[in-house]
Image (spheres, helix red, strand yellow):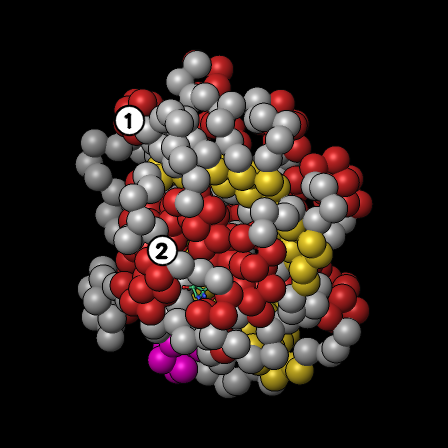
Amino acid sequence: MSFDELGLQAELLRAIDAQGYTRPTPIQAQAIPVVLQGRDVLAGAQTGTGKTAAFTLPVLQLLSGRERRGKAPRALVLTPTRELAAQVGESVVTYGEHLALRSTVIFGGVGINPQKDALRRGVDVLVATPGRLLDHAGQGTIDLSAVEILVLDEADRMLDMGFIHDIRKVLKLLPRQRQNLLFSATYSDDIKRLADGLLHQPALIEVARRNTAAQTVTQHVYRADKDLKRDLLIYLIDEGNWFQVLVFTRTKHGANRLAEQLNRAGIGAAAIHGNKSQGARTKALAGFKDGSLRVLVATDIAARGLDIDKLPHVVNYELPNVAEDYVHRIGRTGRAGESGAAISLVGQDEVKLLKGIQRLIKRDIEVLPVPDFVPKVLAPPPPKPAKQPAGGRNKGKRGSGKPPGRQGQARGNAAADTAKAPTRRRRRPAKPASGNAR
Ligand code: AMP
């Protein structure tokens, strides 16, 4: 099967060619022809399957063949997260390079005025997160009455994130007559209900069976309790010379703390989660993609939909509470036929979660013996800025500016190695040299 056989127009084939894609992925081969026929689609496909192009390409073709009557958007793509919206927006620009269609992306956390300007100028394809879209609707800065095609991307995650009411509000603003495409990695009852109310005789497309991890991903477990995890992770990254590692933690605070500790071990890291400003998230993601940041520490929601080419390593620093999230997490690696490794650090208190995951994926994950290693001595935390009052917001518990002593480090899952050799540690540079650029 080649792209030529899918009925795509020359302008799109040129853009596909420029991306270096030689063959359509299974979801593309199945979805593109039916979307071009104008049918509704219910597609079960995860990130990494090529689903974005599977809806973007035919949507662009349909719009470019139809007359534009005003400036209001004719296709609306709803996504759960800002990152996914930005990535879909990029794909629309990439694939639509040779077409005279306009697109824009709107999401929260950034100024609303440039978005209003873009909408005023006119948009064919609008990619949006539900909350900010409704803000625009409330302010009367968007007209959704011309939407001919609606795409719900990662609909399951939108429901997980509590967007169902927002989605229903958006639906009320759309014309009744339209084409609907719903993409979801899983089919819960809620998704079925949403699909039943939304889709008309949809084509059902399912690729990479639900809850099946990509075959190209090797999965392993290290049994490690809290105090060992950080040192083991640093050892594995250093020893294995891992250069691009996505690490999952359960909490935002845990993500921040781990990123800081990795930096002190000389491993460039940044945390990405919902409390970070959009600017910080974009910067972290860009650094991670271009190789200047070796580790991205993320919570599940922030990582959802991240598209990073050929991600070689995913680490579950903590297992997710919901077994299906494990499948989503490791779906970040081994993409588009590349091989990848998924490592989970599993404490005694997580054994039950591990069993749940193994039941879901219908296989046991091999447990590797924890290697013998000497924990790396961390650099002291960077000195606090002088203007900050003692007991500042983030690190008050650790004293004001002094290198942490034995008690200061004993909290949480900070391992004991920093406390073992405080004098030696002080002589080390604040940012030890490491193989990667920072
Ligand atoms: P997605 O599932 O949409 O997030 O896409 C996953 C990745 O696959 C993206 O990096 C795409 O650029 C890439 N991709 C999409 N379609 C193809 C294709 N036909 N051949 C190779 N890579 C592709």
x 55%, y 73%: residue? 342
Identified by mark 1, the residue type is: Arg
Between 12 and 274, the one lying in front of the other is 12
The image quadrant in which ligand 1 is located: bottom left
The spot of residue 39 in percent (x, y) is 63, 48
The residue at which mark 2 appears reads as 95
Q: Is residue 144 magenta?
A: no
Residue 150 placement, left or right of 159: left
Q: CA distance from mark 1 to mark 2?
A: 21 Å
The spot of residue 119 in percent (x, y) is 34, 26
Residue 121's mark?
A: 1
Q: Earlier in the sequence, mark 1 or mark 2?
A: 2
x 40%, y 18%: residue? 141
Callout 2 secondary element: helix
Q: Is residue 239 magenta?
A: yes
Residue 225 placement, left or right of 81: right
x 24%, y 75%: residue? 435
Instruction: Name the quarter where the C terminus is drawn.
Output: bottom left
